[in-house]
Structures are given as C-alpha cells and as structure tokens.
C-alpha cells in the first residue's frame, strides 16, 4: 500500500489518535461540538463543514491513511499445507470449500500445493506480500471477474493465475484440481 504524505498526516495528528488517526469523540451537548449531519467534507482540524479544495485533498489523504493503518492490526491468514509448496491457492468468500477439497486431493496425489483463505482484502493485512512471495505461483479461484487477482497484482506486484467463474454456479473441487494440475504438471 502506498504510504501517505507524512507532512499532511502530521499536521492533524495532534488532535487525532496517533495509531488510527480518529478524532476524539465529542461529548454530546458540548457547546460548539454539536453533531453535524451530512455528506459534506469536514475541516481537518475542527470537523466543521468545509468547501476548501486544499482541505478536501488533505482529508482524502488522511482517510486513505486511516484505512491503510487498519492493515497493521489484521492477522495474517494461515497457510495450510507444506511451507515449501510450489503453488499457493488463495481464496476468499465462497470458494473456500472447493479449494479445501481440491488442495487436499492434490496433496494426496503428491503435488506440492498449499492454500490460504483471505478474510480481509481491503486493506490487506500487513506482511501479506512477504507471505505470498514465498511461493513460485499463486492460483486465485474467484466467483467474479478476478477482483482479488487484480488487487494482488496491484498491491503486491505478483502476477497470480486467475481462475474466474461467473456462471451462477459455485466452483467444484474438480474444476480447481484440474487447474492445479495444469499449473504444476503442465
């Protein structure tokens, strides 16, 4: 994840939590700190409504940094299988069951394959890049048009093999196993 300009973050850090960049909560009824509703941009220091372009830029950067810092608190997903596997099958959401079945069958057939199931994808847990780069190849089966594959490519600079499916039916174990064999034997 790209690091945010530290000077912009530092300008407002005195009034915010240093770890999360969250503002302190205003006690309800405090004069001058009444809750303001609406989707308008807030002023960086006071939280008052602002239409200033420079403030909007600063607040956009701060929000991006707040999201990035969440990654430091997320646990790394566990690798299931041999740590020296040549292929890591990375899944998220509904692909987990079919991936478990396919990887188990591949391992029984003597193939060097492991699996990892993502629980958090925005932001990625800190350290995920190092985990993924330990494997020669990544296979990412997804019930969409490859969003996780694209995130991995963009955020980790790793080019995974995408296995996308948008037919309205879940993956079968055999579909994923076929792709595992194609990659490792092929």
Image (cartoon, rainbow, N blue to C red):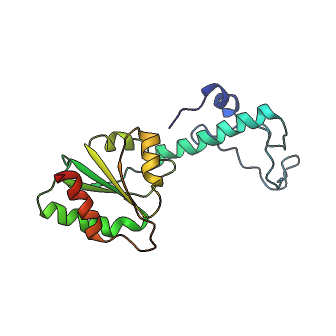
Among the 4 quarters of the image, the one containing residue 171: bottom left
As drawn, is 138 to the left or to the right of 108? Answer: right
Residue 80 shows up from this direction: no
Note whether 107 is above or below 84 in the view shown: below
Front-most of 124 and 34?
124
How far across and down, in percent of the image, does residue 93 sit?
A: 43, 64
Q: How many discs mark residues in the rendered view?
A: 0
Front-most of 183 and 121?
183
Residue pictured at 39% horizontal, 72% vertical: 170
Note whether 132 is above or below 114 in the view shown: above
Front-most of 177 and 35?
177
How far across and down, in percent of the image, does residue 178 sit?
A: 24, 63
Residue lying furthest bottom: 169
Residue pictured at 30% horizontal, 64% vertical: 99
How far across and down, in percent of the image, does residue 124 sit?
A: 46, 47
Residue 70 shows up from this direction: yes
How far across and down, in percent of the image, does residue 183 sit?
A: 23, 52
Note whether 81 is above or below 156 in the view shown: below
Among the 4 quarters of the image, the one containing residue 19: top right
Residue pictured at 31% horizontal, 71% vertical: 172
């Amino acid at each position: 994840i790209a690091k945010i300009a530290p000077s912009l973050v530092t300008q407002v850090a005195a009034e915010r939590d240093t770890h999360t960049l969250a503002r302190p909560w205003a006690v309800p009824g405090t004069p001058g700190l009444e809750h303001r509703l609406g989707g308008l941009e807030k002023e960086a220091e006071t939280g008052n409504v602002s239409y200033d372009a420079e403030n909007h830029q600063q607040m956009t950067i701060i929000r991006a940094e707040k999201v990035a810092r969440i990654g430091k608190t997320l646990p790394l997903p566990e690798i299931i299988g041999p740590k020296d596997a040549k292929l890591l099958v990375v899944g998220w959401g509904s692909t987990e069951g079919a991936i478990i079945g396919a990887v188990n069958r591949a391992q029984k057939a003597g193939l060097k394959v492991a699996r990892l199931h993502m629980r958090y994808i925005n932001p990625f847990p800190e350290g995920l890049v190092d985990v993924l780069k330990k494997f020669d190849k990544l296979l990412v089966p997804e019930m969409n048009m490859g969003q996780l594959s694209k995130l991995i490519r963009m955020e980790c600079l790793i080019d995974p093999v995408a296995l996308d499916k948008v037919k309205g039916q879940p993956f079968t174990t055999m579909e994923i196993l076929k792709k595992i064999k194609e990659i490792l034997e092929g």
